C-alpha cells in the first residue's frame, strides 16, 4: 500500500485522485492546493484531508507525492518532495526551463528517491502495443514515424498566456512519443507554425495554434508531427510507424464501433472529444507503472532525464519556427 499526497485540485488533479482511490494498493491521504477550499472539496468525498504543503511533506505517513498543480510549481514541489524523501510522480513538464529541470534532477539524485514524469501516451494500450511490435521486429528497421495530434478546440486564452506555448504545452507529448518510437534521439528539428484557428492566439497569447514539424536522427530516421488546436470532429490521435518490412498504425479511439450504412454513405462515431476520455486508460496505466516501480524499487519508466531531453526538442522547435530554418538539437 503506497500512501499519497496529491498537489493540485484542478481537472488533472481530480482525475488522478479518482484513479488513486479506485486502487487497492494505494491510499490518498492529503490534497494540497493554493485554494484550500478546492482541496477540501476534492479531498473530503474521497476520504482524504486538505493540507498545506508543509503538513503533507512533513508527515512520515506519506510515501509518495503526485504533482498535478500548475506547471510553474512542478520543479519546486519536486525538489521539496525529494528533500523530504518522498517518491515523486510529476505531471509533464517538470518545468519550462532547463535550469529548473536540472535543479530538480540533481535534487532527486541526491535524495535517491524515484521520480516519474507523466508522459501518459506511452501507456495508451494501442500505442504501447504498437511499440511492443516495433521492438519485436514486426516491421523490420524503423525508417519513418508519423504522429497526428489535433485538439478539438482552443483552451481558454488565459491558459495560453501561461502555458509556455504550443510546443512546450502540446507538442511536448509528440516529442516524447517520437523519441520512444524512433529508438534514437532526434538531432535536428524543422518546425513551421501559423495562426489559422483564432487571431487572438497571436495577439493575446503570443503563440501559434497550428504547426508541422520534421525531426531527423543521426542515422537518417525521420518523424513528421502534425498539430492543430482545432479538429471539429473530435480529439484526433493517430500514429503510423513505417519500416523496412512493413507498417504499423494505431488509429483513433471512438466511443463505440457502431457504423450506419446507407445508400449514400457509411458513417460511425467521431473520436472521443477530450483527452480525459481518450487517454483514460493511459492515465490509469501510468499510475500502475509508478506504483510498481516504488513497490519493487525499480527505475521509473519515464525518469526526469526524459523530460530534459524533450525540453531540448521544444527549444529547437521554437527556434526553428522563428528562423524558418532547421535547428540542431543541443547536446547540453
Image (spheres, grey):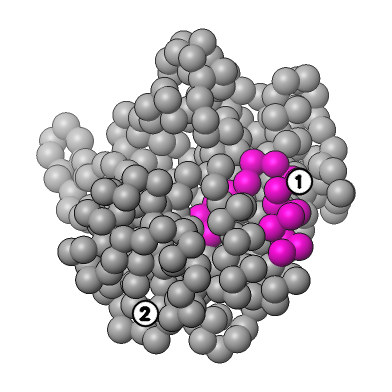
Residue at label 2? 26
Spot occupied by residue 46 in the image (x, y as percentages of width and height): 22, 67
Residue 252 visible within the image? no
| 316 up-or-down from 101: above or below | above
Spot occupied by residue 285 in the image (x, y as percentages of width and height): 42, 70
The reply, left or right, for residue 109 in relation to residue 207 is right
Q: Element type at marker 1?
A: helix
Instruction: Please tell me whether residue 92 belongs to the stretch shown in magenta.
Output: yes
**Residue at x-position 15% and y-position 44%:** 261
| 44 up-or-down from 277: above or below | below
Q: Element type at marker 2?
A: strand
Tell which of 324 and 86 is nearer to you.
86
Residue 7 visible within the image? yes
Neighbours of disc 2 within 10 Å: few (<14), some (14-19), many (20+): some
Spot occupied by residue 3 in the image (x, y as percentages of width and height): 41, 78
For residue 286, the mark is: none
**Highlighted range, magenta:** 90-107
Neighbours of disc 1 within 10 Å: few (<14), some (14-19), many (20+): few
Residue at label 1? 99
Instruction: Please tell me whether residue 229 belongs to the stretch shown in magenta.
Output: no
Measure how far apart labels 1 and 2 are at the Cα level.
33 Å
Tell which of 71 and 77 is nearer to you.
77
Q: Based on the displayed image, in which of its 4 quarters is residue 110 positioned?
A: bottom right
Amino acid at each position: 500500500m503506497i500512501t499519497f499526497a496529491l498537489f493540485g485540485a484542478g481537472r488533472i488533479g481530480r482525475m488522478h485522485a479518482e484513479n488513486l482511490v479506485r486502487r487497492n494498493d494505494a491510499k490518498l491521504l492529503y490534497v494540497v492546493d493554493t485554494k484550500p477550499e478546492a482541496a477540501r472539496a476534492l479531498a473530503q468525498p474521497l476520504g482524504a484531508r486538505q493540507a498545506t504543503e508543509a503538513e503533507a511533506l512533513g508527515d512520515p505517513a506519506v510515501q509518495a507525492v503526485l504533482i498535478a498543480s500548475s506547471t510553474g510549481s512542478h520543479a519546486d514541489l519536486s525538489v521539496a518532495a525529494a528533500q523530504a524523501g518522498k517518491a515523486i510522480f510529476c505531471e509533464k513538464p517538470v518545468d519550462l526551463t532547463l535550469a529548473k529541470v536540472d535543479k530538480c534532477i540533481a535534487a532527486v539524485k541526491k535524495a535517491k528517491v524515484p521520480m516519474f514524469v507523466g508522459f501518459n501516451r506511452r501507456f495508451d494500450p494501442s500505442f504501447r502495443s504498437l511499440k511492443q511490435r516495433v521492438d519485436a521486429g514486426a516491421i523490420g528497421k524503423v525508417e519513418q514515424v508519423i504522429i497526428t495530434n489535433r485538439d478539438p478546440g482552443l483552451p481558454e486564452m488565459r491558459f495560453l498566456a501561461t502555458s509556455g506555448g504550443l510546443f512546450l504545452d502540446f507538442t511536448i507529448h509528440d516529442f516524447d512519443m517520437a523519441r520512444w518510437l524512433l529508438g534514437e534521439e532526434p538531432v535536428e528539428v524543422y518546425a513551421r507554425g501559423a495562426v489559422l484557428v483564432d487571431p487572438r492566439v497571436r495577439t493575446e497569447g503570443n503563440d501559434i495554434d497550428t504547426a508541422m514539424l520534421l525531426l531527423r536522427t543521426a542515422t537518417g530516421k525521420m518523424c513528421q508531427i502534425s498539430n492543430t488546436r482545432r479538429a471539429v470532429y473530435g480529439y484526433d490521435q493517430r500514429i503510423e510507424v513505417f519500416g523496412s518490412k512493413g507498417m504499423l498504425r494505431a488509429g483513433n479511439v471512438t466511443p463505440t464501433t457502431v457504423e450506419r450504412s446507407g445508400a449514400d454513405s457509411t458513417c460511425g462515431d467521431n473520436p472521443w472529444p477530450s483527452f480525459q476520455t481518450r487517454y483514460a486508460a493511459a492515465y490509469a496505466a501510468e499510475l500502475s507503472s509508478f506504483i510498481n516501480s516504488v513497490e519493487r524499487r525499480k527505475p521509473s519508466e519515464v525518469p526526469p532525464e526524459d523530460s530534459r531531453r524533450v525540453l531540448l526538442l521544444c527549444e529547437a522547435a521554437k527556434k526553428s519556427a522563428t528562423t524558418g530554418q532547421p535547428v540542431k538539437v543541443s547536446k547540453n
